[in-house]
Image (cartoon, rainbow, N blue to C red):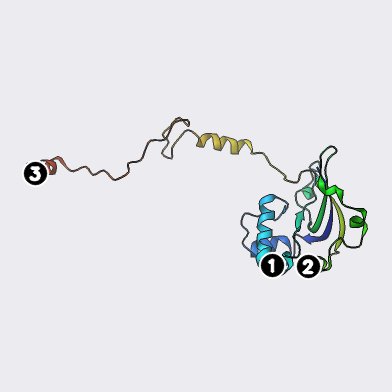
């Protein structure tokens, strides 16, 4: 349940340059616009930005997407926040007893106006101007109680999976530990008995 200290900006979910529109315009069908810290979504967004904003991304090698999430909050607003965070640098502060090399940053990194070199600072500012104009670039502290936000299968989904096991498409049952019946490697043609006798005589 880490607390993130990140340097970057808030990326709105709504709006023409927001997360939802970006996901749709770039056909990121497997991305989750409501929670972009999800690993698959993060990977898809990074790959997309490498194509659309390569000059920016190459100057931000540590760019990450961070979400605010409290698993104890059961309100409707907790499902999807209005903003996610685009971070050029992130410090993760995990639970007590969990080692994390990122916590070894120096105070100068934490309290300076910008922890980035000029090229990276220019890049994160360009990114902000394109996708979140008006948002502040700076330090943020963000809590996420369940970064991967894993959801168990519902009882209905479990039941469907159980029903699928042990039967073929035509309803024939089989033992899941056994190998399904083999499919003939070539088609088998059965000739009428009259023709079989005819060809038998010709070859005799």
Q: Residue at x 91, y 62 (%)?
A: 113
Q: Is residue 34 above or below residue 119?
A: above
Q: Residue at x 69, y 64 (%)?
A: 49
Q: CA distance from mark 3 to mark 2?
A: 84 Å
Place residue 154 in its image quadrant. top right
Query: Of helix, strand and loop, which one carries label 2?
Result: helix
Q: Is residue 152 above or below residue 66?
A: above
Task: List x then y, in percent, for residue 64.
Answer: 75, 56
Residue at numbered disc 3: 203
In this rendering, does residue 195 appear at all? yes
Task: List x then y, in percent, for residue 163.
Answer: 52, 35
Place residue 174 in its image quadrant. top left
Q: Residues within 10 Å of mark 3 (few under 14, many from 20)?
A: few
Question: Quick check: 196 left or right of 151?
Answer: left
Q: CA distance from mark 3 to mark 1?
A: 74 Å
Task: List x then y, in percent, for residue 25.
Answer: 64, 65
User: Which numbered disc, 3 or 2, marks the residue that appears first in the sequence?
Assistant: 2
Question: Quick check: 164 left or right of 9?
Answer: left
Front in this rendered view, residue 144 or 76: 144
Image quarter (top left, top right, bottom left or bottom right) of the C terminus = top left
Image quarter (top left, top right, bottom left or bottom right) of the N terminus = top right
Task: List x then y, in percent, for residue 130.
Answer: 76, 69
Place residue 137 in its image quadrant. bottom right
**How many numbered circles are shown?**
3
Front in this rendered view, residue 94 or 154: 94
Q: Is residue 34 above or below residue 198?
A: below
Residue at numbered disc 1: 54
Residue at numbered disc 2: 123
């Amino acid at each position: 349940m880490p607390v993130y200290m990140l340097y970057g900006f808030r990326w709105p979910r709504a709006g023409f340059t927001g997360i939802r529109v970006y996901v749709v315009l770039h056909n990121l069908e497997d991305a989750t616009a409501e929670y972009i810290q999800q690993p698959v979504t993060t990977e898809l967004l990074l790959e997309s930005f490498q194509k659309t904003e390569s000059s920016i991304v190459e100057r931000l090698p540590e760019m990450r997407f961070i979400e605010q999430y409290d698993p104890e909050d059961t309100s409707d607003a907790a499902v999807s926040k209005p903003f996610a965070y685009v971070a050029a640098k992130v410090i993760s502060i995990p639970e007590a007893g969990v080692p994390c090399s990122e916590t070894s940053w120096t105070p100068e990194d934490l309290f300076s106006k910008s922890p980035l070199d000029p090229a990276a600072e220019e890049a994160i500012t360009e990114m902000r101007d394109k996708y979140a104009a008006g948002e502040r670039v700076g330090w943020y502290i963000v809590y996420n109680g369940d970064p991967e936000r894993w959801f168990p299968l519902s009882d209905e989904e479990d039941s469907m999976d159980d029903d699928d096991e042990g039967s073929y498409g035509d309803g024939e049952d089989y033992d899941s530990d056994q190998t399904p019946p083999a499919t003939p490697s070539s088609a088998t043609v059965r000739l009428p008995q009259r023709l079989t006798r005819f060809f038998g005589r010709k070859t005799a």
